[in-house]
């Protein structure tokens, strides 16, 4: 009996030793592979970093750690350290946990008004548009849009460009019953036909006055733009000129 127990204990000890040996070998192999691949140090977030957090705040709060990675796997612009250049800059979007910090993530810090970043000299205006008018939910914060207005021109309806180019700084959605609807914004799913969406744009005073008036008297429609698109305010089309 004692001989059997001794044999079992010996087997367990050998198995444990073998397991430790395998782990040590794997770790050693990883270290050797890293050493042979010309490793570089990069900064990786230790948790979620909120938009607007400055480089100085990231350092002070310990929101990043330095990690060695093979040089061939590190993307261009990866930061190896937070320098004075990033101290006064802030991340322009939320950075998820375990993400590499890149130079392009930082930009000039924008003061927050009520929790929403508003560009200098601009007003934040929110209006409601339908799901279709909001390009089926594809409009996102940071997008540039043209806003059209359809209104009663006295001799029939008229559709014209209201604001040729404005920046979207916030998108919120709500259902017809007032319930929050987030499916379109999160995964591109089709919105319910009767849903409306809150669009917040950055405009100057003149644009704000036009947009507020149009939202009260007409029907708004959006179009997504890229840098090459050219849009100008014109006569538009009416019921009488639609097929001219």
Image (tube, helix red, strand yellow):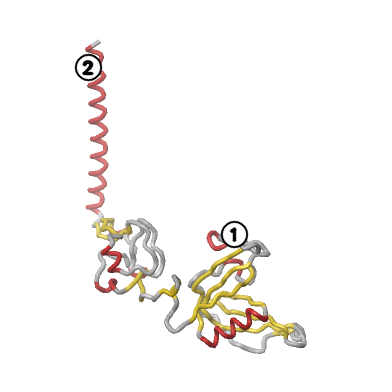
Q: Is residue 33 left or right of residue 118?
A: left
Residue at mark 1 = 189
Label 2 Cα neighbours within 10 Å, binned few <14 / some 14-19 / many ≥20 = few
Q: Residues within 10 Å of mark 1 (few under 14, many from 20)?
A: few
Q: What mark, if any, has residue 70 been given in the picture? A: none
Place of residue 45 in the rendered image (x, y in percent of width and height, measured from the top left): 33, 59
Q: Which is more toward the observer, 161 or 87?
A: 87
- Residue 6 vs residue 201: left or right? left
Task: Please give the name of the residue rendered at 63% of the width and 79% of the height, measured from the top-left corner.
Answer: 215
Is 31 left, or right, of 214 in this rendering? Answer: left
Q: How many marks?
A: 2
SS label for mark 2 = helix
Instruction: Name the residue at the top extreme.
Output: 1
- Residue sitting nearer the eye, 205 or 10: 205
Q: CA distance from mark 2 to mark 1?
A: 64 Å
Residue 162 image position (x, y, % from top left)? 61, 84
Q: Disc 2 or 1, which lies upstream in sequence?
A: 2
User: In which image quadrant can residue 130 be found?
Assistant: bottom right
Quadrant (top left/top right/bottom left/bottom right) for the N terminus: top left
Q: Position of residue 125 (x, y in %)?
A: 53, 78
Image: 100 above or below 31 = below
> Quadrant of the rendered structure where residue 7 is?
top left
List x then y, in percent, for residue 154.
75, 88
Are the two marked residues, 2 and 1, in contact with CB atoms closer than 8 angstroms? no
Q: Which residue is mark 2?
A: 6
Instruction: Judge by depth and name the residue closer to the eye, 207 or 32.
Output: 207
* Position of 190 relative to 123 (above/below): above
Q: Quadrant where the C terminus lies?
A: bottom right
Circle 1 SS class: loop
Q: In percent of the image, x 25 and y 43: which residue is there? A: 27
């Amino acid at each position: 009996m004692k001989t059997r127990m001794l044999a079992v204990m010996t087997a367990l000890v050998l198995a444990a030793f073998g397991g430790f040996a395998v782990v040590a070998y794997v770790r050693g192999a990883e270290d050797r592979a890293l050493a042979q691949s010309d490793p570089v140090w990069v900064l990786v977030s230790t948790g979620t970093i909120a938009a607007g957090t400055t480089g100085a705040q990231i350092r002070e709060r310990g929101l990043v750690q330095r990690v060695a990675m093979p040089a061939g796997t590190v993307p261009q612009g990866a930061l190896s350290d937070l320098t004075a250049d990033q101290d006064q800059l802030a991340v322009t979007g939320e950075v998820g946990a375990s993400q590499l910090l890149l130079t392009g993530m930082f930009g000039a810090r924008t003061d927050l008004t009520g929790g929403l970043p508003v560009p200098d000299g601009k007003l934040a205006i929110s209006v409601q548009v339908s799901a279709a008018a909001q390009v089926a939910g594809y409009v996102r914060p940071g997008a540039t849009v043209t806003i059209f207005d359809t209104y009663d021109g006295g001799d029939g309806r008229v559709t014209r460009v209201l604001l040729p180019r404005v920046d979207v700084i916030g998108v919120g959605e709500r259902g017809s019953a007032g319930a929050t609807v987030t499916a379109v914004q999160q995964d591109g799913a089709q919105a319910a036909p009767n849903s409306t969406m809150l669009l917040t744009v950055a405009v100057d005073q003149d644009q704000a006055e036009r947009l507020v008036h149009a939202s009260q008297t007409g029907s708004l429609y959006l179009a997504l733009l890229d840098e090459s698109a050219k849009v100008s305010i014109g006569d538009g089309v009416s019921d009488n000129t639609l097929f001219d």
